[in-house]
Amino acid sequence: DTEVTQTPKHLVMGMTNKKSLKCEQHMGHRAMYWYKQKAKKPPELMFVYSYEKLSINESVPSRFSPECPNSSLLNLHLHALQPEDSALYLCASSLQDRAYEQFFGPGTRLTVL
Amino acid sequence: AQSVAQPEDQVNVAEGNPLTVKCTYSVSGNPYLFWYVQYPNRGLQFLLKYITGDNLVKGSYGFEAEFNKSQTSFHLKKPSALVSDSALYFCAVRDFNTDKLIFGTGTRLQVFP
């Protein structure tokens, strides 16, 4: 299994809703990432988990809350989002070595109304 | 700080012609360089990487890249472009201080029949 899966593919939510994005990989990778991508722009790093511990938080607003229940799963909990949070949210994973590439999931297209 | 630059927002090429997508880098020390491709509404797909060794790196889908230390460049190339190569291409470098992947701004490749 050499892929990263993300659910849901699309999500529409109101500003008062609570929702979660899910990411899964079974490649034995110990580093997992959340990125936010606006149209025609490069991905922006949000969070990095290394061996199931949060190692990087790029000063992301607290309305985004990551969780890594185990080495294969990564969640992003969303609460009280703003319309400007609408974007493609990408999950990625890699071996725990900077020489190795990151494998990206297909993303979740989030729309905040 | 590590960085990459993609000087062209868009590259247009006729099908069957060779293509080049440019990338230059700025790093302290030896760079770890990557190329990714993104099709519309999809995640990023890894194409190839340079870590060490031969300056000409071969990757997926017939793409290759040439690492040039004197010109600090890592241009992506393909001998014969296909219409299906039309996509957004990102160059990236690994930041050794933070272990993050630093992306360029992206280049849209348009291959015309």
Image (cartoon, grey):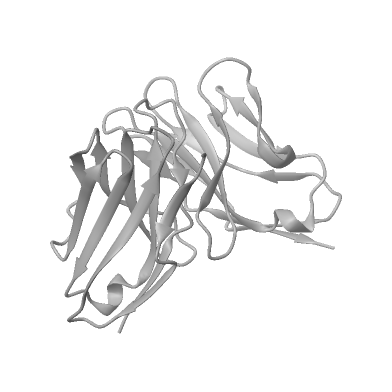
Q: Name the residue located 32 percent from the left edge and 51 percent from the top edge.
A: A34
Q: In this view, does A20 lie above or below B58?
A: below
Q: Is residue A66 above or below residue B74?
A: below
Where residue B66 appears, as percent x and y from the top left, is 65, 29
Q: Name the residue located 31 percent from the left edge and 47 percent from the top edge.
A: A73
The mark tally for this picture is 0
Which part of the image, by quadrant, shows the C terminus of chain B?
bottom right
Which part of the image, by quadrant, shows the N terminus of chain B?
top left
Where residue B6 appears, as percent x and y from the top left, is 53, 47
In this image, B52 relative to B111: left or right?
Answer: left
Q: Is residue A55 visible?
A: yes
Q: Name the residue located 40 percent from the left edge and 66 percent from the top edge.
A: A8
Residue at the far left in the pictured view: A62
Q: Is residue A97 above or below residue B75?
A: above
Residue at the far top in the pictured view: B53
In this image, A42 relative to A35: left or right?
Answer: right
Q: In which quarter of the image is residue B75?
A: top right
Where residue A99 appears, as percent x and y from the top left, is 43, 25
For the residue pair B14 and A12, the one nearer the viewer reads as A12
Q: Name the residue located 34 percent from the left edge and 28 percent from the top edge.
A: A96
Q: In which quarter of the image is residue A22?
A: bottom left
Q: Can residue B7 be seen in this view?
A: no
In this image, A49 relative to B41: left or right?
Answer: left
Q: In which quarter of the image is residue B20?
A: top right
Where residue B62 appears, as percent x and y from the top left, is 74, 38
In this image, B94 relative to B33: left or right?
Answer: left
